[in-house]
Amino acid sequence: MTQTHPIKAPAQAMTDASLRDDAAPPFAVAAFYHFGSLPHYRDLQAPLRDACARLGVRGIALLAAEGVNGTMAGTRAAMEEVLETLRCLTGFNTIDHKWSQAREMPFLRLKVRLKKEIVTLGVDGVDPNKQVGTYVAPEDWNAVISDPDVIVIDTRNHEEVRIGSFAGAVDPLTRSFSEFPDYVKNNLDPAKHKKVAMFCTGGIRCEKASSYMLQEGFSEVFHLKGGILSYLEKIPASESLWQGECFVFDRRIALGHGLVEAADLVLCGGCRAPLSDSERRSADYEEGVCCPYCAPLMTAERKQSARERHRQMRLAEARGGTHLGPWTCDSAE
């Protein structure tokens, strides 16, 4: 039942020396989350937003009764202070976070939002604080997914899977994480699929998915600790089972081994699908408007609206300003 999707060659890994180089990217990006009881989460929105604004930090943070989730960028010192502020406000002693870098500010604005869930599964009673699958360190992941008795599932959306995944992983073909429970009910059986291993970008989706699957009666559920980002950071390309690049929800679009920014991807202005050079050569591609995936579904009116938005973006750039355009992102992962 393994799905196939186009895979690109791995990106060249970034060396430790390049991270220390004087020309290293000036922006530190922190992807973070923590599941924990946070009944006073509404009271945290304003102080967190104020701290980020004061420090010049942009990105998105989601607060809910079940915890916190976000991806933000700023100077390294500013991001360290934001993480410390989060620990103080939430009372969480530790907040799982992963560092990467960006040559330019990867977010156009700051958003701190209140949510029902920090990652939306849409199933009542699922609580990673009560039960969760077995964490697998990146160093042990290859052995787990190479076990022929293990079914490996990519819990991300299809557009993310399309540009990169682990060899042999199943693509559930979901458009959002809230579709994952239906995929499980329609395709997986606890009596047949004894061992399930899951992964996602930073770890939060597969952590919640593992809690859900245990609730549904699956006995052995594994998930990649720290997600794909930790794997790409820690596992050398020569030993890696990852193929392609990892989509991220910011202007960098995707990262490769060593968390190096992808060089040949752009987002479609219509549906925000990541597009390679070959996909942009399609007759259905129009910069800032549509691509082979959305063009057949777009009305003439919608295309014209996208053209006008793209024109306004170009005018803003010519004036040295910024237009939000298609870069507004409501998801931290």
Image (cartoon, rainbow, N blue to C red):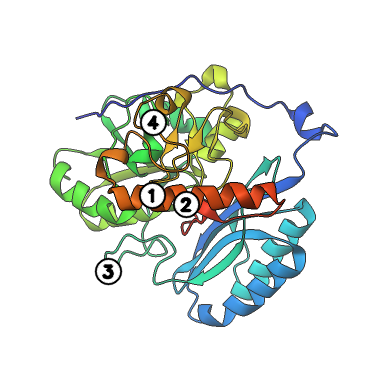
Q: Are marks 1 and 2 in contact (CB under 8 Å)?
A: yes
Q: Are marks 3 and 2 in contact (CB under 8 Å)?
A: no
Q: Which label's residue is closer to the chain start, 3 or 4? A: 3
Q: Identify which amino acid the numbered label 1 is placed on.
A: Gln
**Which residue in the protein does label 3 denote?**
124
Between disc 1 and disc 4, the foreground one is: 1
Q: Identify which amino acid the numbered label 4 is placed on.
A: Val
Please indicate, yes or no, whether residue 210 appears anywhere in the rendered image.
no
Q: CA distance from mark 1 to mark 2?
A: 6 Å
Please give the count of numbered marks on the rendered protein. 4
Residue pictured at 74% horizontal, 29% vertical = 16
Query: What SS does tag 4 mark?
Result: helix
**Which residue in the protein does label 4 denote?**
144
Query: What SS does tag 3 mark?
Result: loop
Between disc 3 and disc 4, the foreground one is: 3
**In the depicted view, which residue is nearer to us: 258 or 22?**
22
Q: Are marks 1 and 4 in contact (CB under 8 Å)?
A: no
Residue pictured at 54% horizontal, 39% vertical = 229
Q: Which label's residue is closer to the chain start, 3 or 2? A: 3
Between disc 3 and disc 1, the foreground one is: 1
Query: What SS does tag 1 mark?
Result: helix
Residue pictured at 33% horizontal, 56% vertical = 211
In the image, which disc is placed on residue 230?
Answer: none
Q: CA distance from mark 3 to mark 2?
A: 42 Å
Q: Identify which amino acid the numbered label 2 is placed on.
A: Glu
Q: CA distance from mark 1 to mark 4?
A: 49 Å
- Residue 249 vs residue 188: left or right? right
Is residue 164 positioned above or below 304 on the image?
above
- Using a 10 Å C-alpha cutoff, classify the residue at mark 4 as few (fewer than 14 neighbours), some (14 to 19) or many (20 or more): some
In the image, which disc is placed on residue 308?
Answer: 2
Relative image position of residue 145 (x, y in whole percent): 37, 29
